[in-house]
Image (spheres, rainbow, N blue to C red):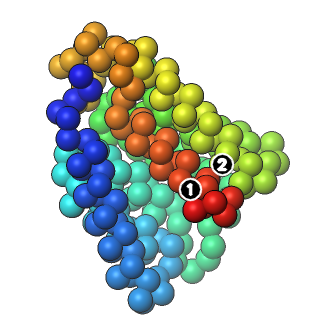
Amino acid sequence: VAGDGDHGIGMKRGVSAAEKRALELMAFRPGIKSLLSGVADAWSDQSGGTSGAIWGVILRSLSEAASDDRAMLIPDLAAALQAAALAVRQFGGAEPGDKTIVDALDPLSEEFASAVAAGADPVDAWRRATEAAEGAVERTSKMAARTGRSKKHGEKSVGTPDPGALSLAIIARAILESLEGKE
């Protein structure tokens, strides 16, 4: 009802490949740009499917905003997340309301940028962004798929959240729990 039924398999492959590559790269003490670039390639190459390509776009976009020579400041991260959301829309042609990962990525990036601009500390800003993404996932349950892998299911997809949006929200929540020391 929400695509080809293989989203979870692709996500598991992508996350596993990204973790393996990150651990390999850490032996060389890479900068954040090189680390994100390597992880982007591993995820995209190994996960298969559309979601693998999209996560490659997200991570590659974040790497392009990073440097190997300096830390990424929180406002830089906020801008990088917004650039990643735009890159995903350009890559797949999806817009908010199409029932795709964009429906969670846009609110995540927008809320994080808004919270950072308002002076929220990074953990609170990420909490607000995570909650925005999770709320967006719920809204995708009420949508009929208009593009992406779920498009062929159209109205039959109503009642089921978009898998890409849900995966993004799960990852955002895991990052939040790590930032809060709950992992």
- Residue at the extreme right of the image, as rendered: 119
Most extreme residue toward the front is 182
Task: Determine which of the numbered discs, if any, sits on residue 126 in the image.
Answer: 2
- Seen from the viewer's position, the closer of residues 3 and 92 is 3
On the image, which quarter does residue 147 sit in? top left
Residue 136, compared with residue 124, is above or below; it is above
Q: Residue at x 36, y 38 (%)?
A: 164
Where's the C terminus, which quadrant?
A: bottom right
Q: Are marks 1 and 2 in contact (CB under 8 Å)?
A: yes
Q: Position of residue 57 (x, y in %)?
A: 35, 51
Badge 2 local density, few (<14 within 10 Å), some, or many (20+)? many
Note whether 180 is above or below 137 in the view shown.
below
Can you tell which mark lies on residue 175? 1
Q: Count neighbours of disc 1 (C-alpha within 10 A) and say few if under 14, some if 14 to 19, many if 20 or more.
A: some
Q: How many marks?
A: 2
Q: Amino acid at mark 1?
A: Ile
Question: Label 1, label 2: how many angstroms apart (C-alpha)?
Answer: 8 Å
Residue at 68% in and 40% down: 128
Mark 1 or mark 2: whose residue is earlier in sequence: 2
What x and y, as percent, mark residue 127? 67, 45
Closest to the observer, 66 or 122 = 122
Q: Is residue 89 visible?
A: no
Mark 1 residue element: helix
Q: Is residue 179 above or below residue 119?
A: below
Identified by mark 2, the residue type is: Trp
Q: Quadrant of residue 102?
A: top left
